[in-house]
Image (tube, helix red, strand yellow):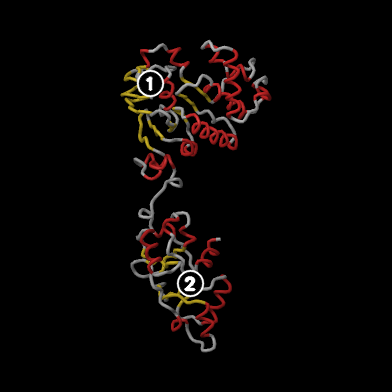
Amino acid sequence: MVRFEQVSKKYDNIEVVKRISLEINEGELVTLIGPSGCGKTTTLKMINRLIEPSNGTIYVNGEDILKQDPVQLRRGIGYVIQQIGLFPNMTIAQNIAVVGKLQGWSKEKMLARVKELLDLVGMEPASYMDRYPKELSGGQQQRIGVLRALATNPNIILMDEPFGALDPITREQLQGELKKLQAQLHKTIIFVTHDMDEALKIADRIVLMRDGEIVQAAAPDEMLRHPADDFVASFIGKDRLLRSPDEVKVEEVMITNPVTIESNRGLAEALERMRNRRVDSLMVVDDMNRLIGVITIKAVQAGLDQGGQLGKYVAEHPAAAVIGQTVREAVYLMAEHNVGYLPVIDENEQLQGLMTRASLVDILTDVLWPGLDSPNSLLTATAKEEN
């Protein structure tokens, strides 16, 4: 549908777009994104020849754009900009129909198309057709800008940060409406944005640019899972990156302050600590903070009459994760030993933290949970600790 072959754009001696090659498929919504000055808007505007390429070839529907009449080319491509550009002295119906009028459409055909498009975005034609742009909100005006681009049913729509000037709530609404429209109309949309959240939400494919070059072009999920380099990872933001349980280490998700008690303490002290910390189990350590095991409230209550130090009542924990192990390995340990929590130790067996289902919830998918219906004596306790 749209193909760039070694396309460059120079202003004097400055090359703002550098020999890019890219193919955009029919019906695909592609976002161009990158830092200011990366060349994304220049790339967009070269498609409809608002900016002429210096080198290389751009094909639209298989034809070299430089061999086409620029006016006819633009009339066959929808174009939406941030400033909207509605004509203030024209009604909403007239604004939507302006390109159809230039193409010689009859009044009846234009009126039918206006009504159809307004219905498409939930704007009652009888209520909006005869209004003027100043009578609409910013979000409504931008909807009309999108409808005007769709009026003559072009196969390609160019959108240059169309929602950038809107408030966050309206912007999110319009992003959702654009996705619904795309699902119905299957247009080829090239959408410039500086907002990664917006790109991730709407795009079939994201093209990330830097210094006039394409750094990575990939589906959102692919880019989140496998950023091409440190620049891509940084631009996406580490909080958005998706990593598999094979890539996440236990120390990244463990609770670092589990409730512990030394093995030479008494049962009454253990019971008091449980009461104060609102837990029903304690991790037992020695004076070097090496893990010995776990003691439950049931064991403490059973031994209160007999008394003595905790050491003789401690049950050895069946398994422990080691710093450096992956989350997947830890989950398998939890399943293998039928436990709902897992102490995390270092190479010297010193307690470093605790993994629970609560600490894993943001990392693991439901696929990894089967078989983990195990006792959760520390799960509730550590969840409270987290809160």
Is 235 positioned to the left or the right of 381 in the image? left
* 24 vs 229, nearest the viewer: 24
User: Relative to 220, is 5 above or below?
Assistant: above
Which quarter of the figure is the N terminus placed in?
Answer: top left
Give the image location of residue 21, x and y in percent: 33, 27
User: Image height check: is 82 above or below 300?
Assistant: above
| Residue hosting label 2 | 260
* Amino acid type, label 2: Thr
Find residue 290 and name its label: none
Which element carries disc 2, helix, strand or loop?
A: strand
Quarter of the image where one finds residue 57: top left
Q: Amino acid at mark 1?
A: Asn
As helix, strand or loop, the secondary structure at mark 1 comes to loop
Q: Which residue: 49% across, 60% down?
A: 358
Front tag of 1 and 2: 1
Percent x, y for residue 89?
64, 15
According to the picture, the residue beneath numbered tag 1 turns out to be 61
